[in-house]
Structure formats: structure tokens, C-alpha cells
Image: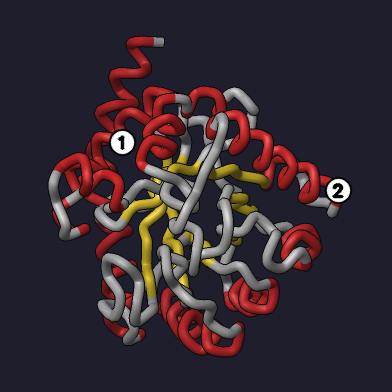
Amino acid sequence: MLSFSGKPLIMGILNVTPDSFSDGGSYSEVGKAVEQAKRMLDEGADIIDIGGESTRPGSVPVSAEEQIKRVLPVIEAIRSQLSESVKISIDTRLSEVAAAAVDAGANLINDVSAGADDPRIFALAAKTKSVLVLMHRQGIPSTMQENPYYQDVVEEVLSGLMQSVSLALSAGIEKHRLIIDPGIGFGKRKIDNLDLLANLSKFVATGYPVLLGTSRKRFMGSICAVENPAQLVTATAVTTALGVMAGVQIFRVHDVKENRQAADVAYAIKQRWD
């Protein structure tokens, strides 16, 4: 199990996809993927989040068969070549992919649809006693950024997440195995993302561990006048530090070293502040 009683956790992103928005194609070969996993662990990652389908705005679904073909060799290689204690997360919306990944050694299921795209994922998580990340998303990846709208984004996202939590609990998933994620950039405008970041403490107040995923997101590029996502490392680290101060426990990032430092310094300050 994960412990949320100490320093914030860093979840390193390992996309084994050809089309992810920031690093598509970089780690599609098993050897390169394992090297990147080792690098992230050396830099302070607590969890490796492996995904075989891009869910960036405008993306199209990838079949369960193709996702399994992409992620399973990587999970198996990490388990055989790196420490058995490595925490591995499978980033998928499909229960078939999640089941194969858990069988291969994944500990967490990170579902950007919070069970909406494949409700069987709840029963799977309950049966396997896997940790389940429930993320809020408005719409579907292919169209979610075309015209997102909220009257009160914080309350609507909170309400949506609590509905997902209720479904998960009803399926038999234990409360301490659930994590919530406000879904920065998933069917949200820039102003929505900023409002969510300004109110992270309300999500923390639910009592569920909160995961924050802002890494290299486009809304920060519009603020910083930067088009290349890889140049948003500092911007991401700022949101990590702010998240730590709000009580967020997990940060999903591409750039582990920089965000590990930001999280550790912010956490040290927070200990004196509290």
C-alpha cells in the first residue's frame, strides 16, 4: 500500500505511445522505457505510471489489445529488471487492460474516465484490491476541449468526483484504496484550471488523497507564452509546490527531479507553517 503520512509522492509518467502530447514515441521500445523508469526512480519517483493510450485533447481511442501489446512487456521488464518493490500504475480506461497489467505486477489503476468508459473497472479494482485513481473529465478526449463550460467548476468537479467515489465504494472498493484527481486540462478552459488550482484544499478536505496532474499542460504555456511543452518544467514545478502547500499528496509529472525538489522544499516549509 501507499503511505500518505509523510512527504508527497511523485508519480513519473511513462508513455509507451507514439502520439502523447509531450513525449510521444520516446519510450515505445521496451529497453528505452525501462531505462526511463530507472532514471525516474533514481531521481526520486515513488510510482511509475505506464500508459498505452494517449488521452490528450483530440486523441482517438486505442483498443484494449493494442494497449496490452504496448504496456505488458514494459511492466514485465520493470518487474524483472528493477526492484520488486517498485510501485507501478497502469494508466487506462479499460478493465481488460487494467486486468492484464495488474496480473503482470501493476499496483494502481489510473482511470481518467473514473469508471465512466468501462464500469467493470470498479469490480476489477475491488477483486484485486488495487488502488484506483478516479479523475474528473468533462466529455471525451477527442472533443473535450471544443467547448467546455461550467457554472461553478470547483463545485461541479467535486460533485462529479464524489459521485464516482460513491460508485467505487458500492462496488466494494475500500475507501483507503481510492484517490481523486480534479483532471486539470480534461474538458477545462484555462480559467477552470486556474480556479481548480486555487481551490485544491477543497479537494483535500474530502479526506481522500488527491493526485494532481499539471505536467507540461497547455494552459500554462498560454500564460508563459511557450508553445513547446518540454519548456514548461519550471511552470509545472510551481504548481507542484502550490499543491503541496494545499495538502495534495501525489503529483503526476514528466520531469521527476525538478518536481521532487519542488515538492520536498515546499513540504519542509509546510511543516514549519503548520
Relative side of 109 to 121, left or right = left
Task: In the rendered view, tell whether residue 21 sits above or below residue 66.
Answer: above
Residue 138 in percent (x, y) is at: 57, 52
How many discs appear? Answer: 2
Determine whether 95 is above or below 149 in the image.
Answer: below
Report the amino acid beneath label 1: Thr
Q: In which quarter of the image is residue 47?
A: bottom left
Residue 172 visible: yes
- Under tag 1, what secondary structure? helix
Task: Give the quadrant of residue 32.
Answer: bottom left
Residue 169, x across and y down, in percent = 80, 46
Could you say whether the residue bearing mark 2 is in a helix, strand or loop? helix
Circle 1 is placed at which residue position?
239
* Extreme-front residue of the structure: 147
Residue 24 occupies quadrant:
bottom left
Residue at left offset 65%, top offset 76%: 103
